Each structure stands twice: as C-alpha cells, then as structure tokens.
Image (cartoon, rainbow, N blue to C red):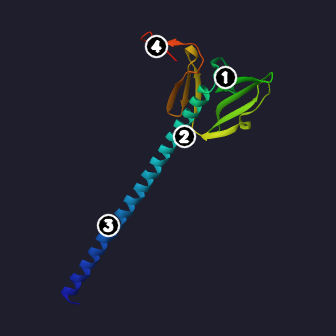
Amino acid sequence: MTKYAKGQKVENVIVLLIFCAFAVSVLMVLMFGASIYKNMTEVSREGQNERTTLSYIRTKVKNDDDASRIYVGDFHGQSALCFDEELGGILYRTVVYHYDGWVFELFSEAELEFYPEDGTRIIRIDSLEFESLEYGIIKVYAGEMELLVYPRGGRQMRNGLGTEVA
C-alpha cells in the first residue's frame, strides 16, 4: 500500500468521525429541545388550568346575587366553596371543591350526605383551597395562583383611601 493510500484512509476515518460527532450533537440538541418544549407545554397547560379555574369560580360567585348564601365550608375535611339556595321550600347546596387532582362541583339537597367522588369533574388542577376573609371576601388558591373575590350584594367595604369598594 502506498503512502498516499494510507493518508487517504486516515483522512476518510477522520472525516467519518467528525461527521459522527456532528450527527450525535445534532441528535442531542434535538432531544434536549423536545424535552424543553414538552416541559414548557406542561407548565403552560397547568397555568391555563389554574386561570380557567379562577375564572370559573369568579363567574360562579359573581352570578349569585345574594352574598349571604356564599361561604367557605368544609367538605370531607377540606375547604370548599358553598352556595345555598332555596327552591320550592327545599334548601339546596352547590359545593365546589378539589378531589383527586380535579375541581369538582356537587349540587344536592343541603341535608343529604354525599362523598367527594359523587360530584362532577370540572377541570384538572394540582390544588384548590378557599379562605374566608373579612367583609365577605373569599380568597381562592388555585395551584400557584390566588384570587380575591367579593360576592355581589354583599356589604360595602372601604379601602385604605376611605372609598367604598364593591
């Protein structure tokens, strides 16, 4: 074998190794990019579910015209948002709560006993909690987000400037 043929083989091997290194690096970049995209999509989806949950609760509270019927209660050991209403002389209760990774809603007669799995699934979310504050304000924690909601028809309150806030 001539010296020229040996040099040609070495050059071919070096080119092949450089090509393989380039191909491996491209594959790694694509894998990392796909992983990052998947994580960002999950974060975005979770944030969307939290915003949708807060919007759902805000709308539910604002659509009730009697603030005295809306309160934070206990439903099987966890905080729940309760709406009482009387229909045909019977007291009914709607309960919004978190169970098994989902927001649930349950509408039933107030005196009947139901279990968390009896409600209707609304939307998947990691956590949901309610807290009752002064002046009828309800604080909602949905995952990483929070919402302060003030039911319509409630007492007027004053902010730090002495003006009324509805």
Residue 143: image x %, image y %? 53, 34
Sequence order check, earlier mark of 4 and 1: 1
Alpha carbon of mark 1 to alpha carbon of mark 2: how far? 23 Å
User: Looking at the image, is mark 3 or mark 2 nearer the viewer?
Assistant: 2
Q: Secondary structure at mark 3?
A: helix
Identity of the amino acid at label 2? Asn
The residue pinned by badge 1 equals: 73
Alpha carbon of mark 4 to alpha carbon of mark 1: how far? 26 Å
Indicate which disc residue 8 carries.
none
**Residue furthest top in the image:** 162
Q: Are marks 1 and 3 in contact (CB under 8 Å)?
A: no
User: Looking at the image, is mark 2 or mark 4 nearer the viewer?
Assistant: 4
Sequence order check, earlier mark of 3 and 4: 3
User: Looking at the image, is mark 4 or mark 1 nearer the viewer?
Assistant: 4
User: Looking at the image, is mark 1 or mark 3 nearer the viewer?
Assistant: 1
Identity of the amino acid at label 1? Gly
| Mark 1 crowd level (few <14, some 14–19, many ≥20, 10 Å Cα) | some
User: Looking at the image, is mark 3 or mark 4 nearer the viewer?
Assistant: 4
Residue 125: image x %, image y %? 58, 39
Alpha carbon of mark 3 to alpha carbon of mark 2: how far? 40 Å
Q: Nearer the viewer, residue 90 or 42?
A: 90
The residue pinned by badge 3 equals: 22
Residue at x-position 68% and y-position 25%: 83
Sequence order check, earlier mark of 1 and 2: 2
Sequence order check, earlier mark of 1 and 3: 3
| Mark 2 crowd level (few <14, some 14–19, many ≥20, 10 Å Cα) | some
